[in-house]
Amino acid sequence: MLIGCVIVYMALTVAVGIYAAGRVHSAKDFMVAGRSLPLYMNFACVFATWFGAETVLSVSSKFAHKGMGFVSGDPFGAATCLILVAFFFARTFYCMELLTIGDYYHLRYGKFVEVITSLGIASSYLGWTSAQLSALGLVINVLFPQLELNQSILIGAAIVTVYTLFGGMWSVAFTDVIQTAAIVIGLILVALLLGNRAGGFDVVFAEAQKQGKLDLFPHITAAAWMTFIGEFITMSLGSIPQQDVFQRVTSAKDERTAFFGTLGGGLFYFAFAFVPMFIAFAATVIDPAYIAHFESTDPRAVQKILPTLILNATPIWCQVLFFGAVLSAILSTASGTLLAPASLITENVLQPFTKHFSDKKMLILLRVILVLVGIVSTWISVNSKSTMYEMVEGGYKVTLVVAFVPLVCGIYWSRASTQGAIFSILLGVPVWLGTEYIYAEESEQLWRCVPPHLYGLAAAFIGMAVGSMMKPWIHHRQGDAAELAKRRAIPAGH
């Protein structure tokens, strides 16, 4: 029954994606759903895209092993990112009526900065997408043990690519509504079942408190604090200049919907992210043997613990709900992370070669690039030994150093210039990569245990300040969104 339900669910997801293709008539429809999503769809897109495999399988395992103080990046940093976007970036993003976040860099700083930041942002998605494909393969492998893990990853990647390929952002929006419902209902009922088996919520909570799992600041060394701060900043700030965030804001039907959809999605994400943590820790209360499993040095083995537990120790209805929720979380995030880099590469990197393309040709190119992103991400997923959490965090380091400073300074500092943005990138990236060679996570010397990307972020701010206040050698006239739309033959507005 479980296998049949999973197959039906996957087939339904692909069918919805194909149905959504009927709403795609232009690149604008494919990338931002025609800027027409109502609040409930916008909310679902924000929540479902961020509530991915790393939240359900990787973060929950890390919490069960080490506790709250070791998940500062997700959910704390991730939720903070969405709240910051709602209050400080949503209005700017929405009112400019752009298709990609790369368009903002084009208007504010010119073509060179547009291409460099777009490449940085697009490359950051490879880790995030690979994490989702690894998780999808892992779940398929648990359900079909006769398949090898890498074969399972290939099957999962093909499913996600197919349904995103047809409908773009419309596919993401329609399926996210269904998947949000599956995630919420499924995980809550699973949590109630396992909580009761563990003796009740109070017993699980008391045991977590007794073991120090609920201590947010358990660190006693400078090195541990630096890791805690580094992960939080990476997720909370490095996630802001991301195409998937931009797409969800600009897909809303109006500015008010963009604000409340992003804020509501972020707050709900933060609250609901504790549900899979509860499920994972409840497993250790039910059977203390699972504590040793969560301490395994094999990240792929650790991430299989929760699905295997559900498969072997719960009734069939619970299995259906759990795997439905997990598959929903993975598929919703994976589809968004495939679409985002494809949009950036097509619109902002390849644009000089496609400026005379018809909208039909642009749609074809978007879909080709999306398939290529899927192939590269699948290759990384098959060969990577990192946890899903590490894959996601690694991607956000790129955007933190390359794209965050030009974005925030461009919006909130009138003197920010193209020269400053170029200096920011040229100083931030070498400092980040250079300090990787001296970084020692457990060093007693504070300067050596500071995460290298934080040095890169500081250098990026210095580069922006120095470059913008120096005599301008590089000039750029700030562009106009209407001109950009006209040049790209894309109608502005709704």
Image: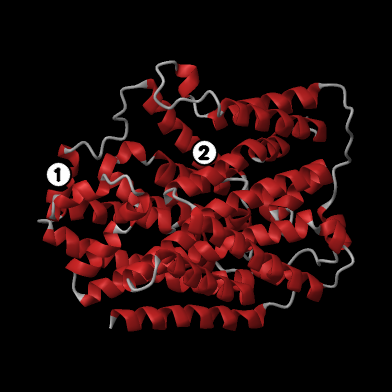
- Return the x and y of residue 410 as percentages of the image width and height: 73, 38
- Return the x and y of residue 378 as percentages of the image width and height: 54, 62
Relative depth, front residue between 230 and 293 = 293
- The structure residue drawn at horizontal position 49% and vertical position 48%, both measured from the top left corner, is 391
- The structure residue drawn at horizontal position 37% and vertical position 78%, both measured from the top left corner, is 6
Specify whether 21 is left or right of 98: left
Give the residue number, with chain letter if any, for mark 2.
Answer: 234
Q: Which amino acid lies under the numbered mark 2 shown in the image of this protein?
A: Thr
Specify the farthest residue to the left.
199
- Return the x and y of residue 382 as percentages of the image width and height: 49, 59
Asked if residue 34 shows in the view, the reply is: no
Give the residue number, with chain letter if any, for mark 1.
Answer: 207
Figure check: 252 above or below 158: above
- Return the x and y of residue 367 as percentages of the image width and height: 69, 70
Specify whether 445 is left or right of 380: left
Measured Cα–Cα span from mark 2 to mark 1: 31 Å
Marks 2,1: beta carbons within 8 A: no
Quadrant hosting residue 488: bottom right
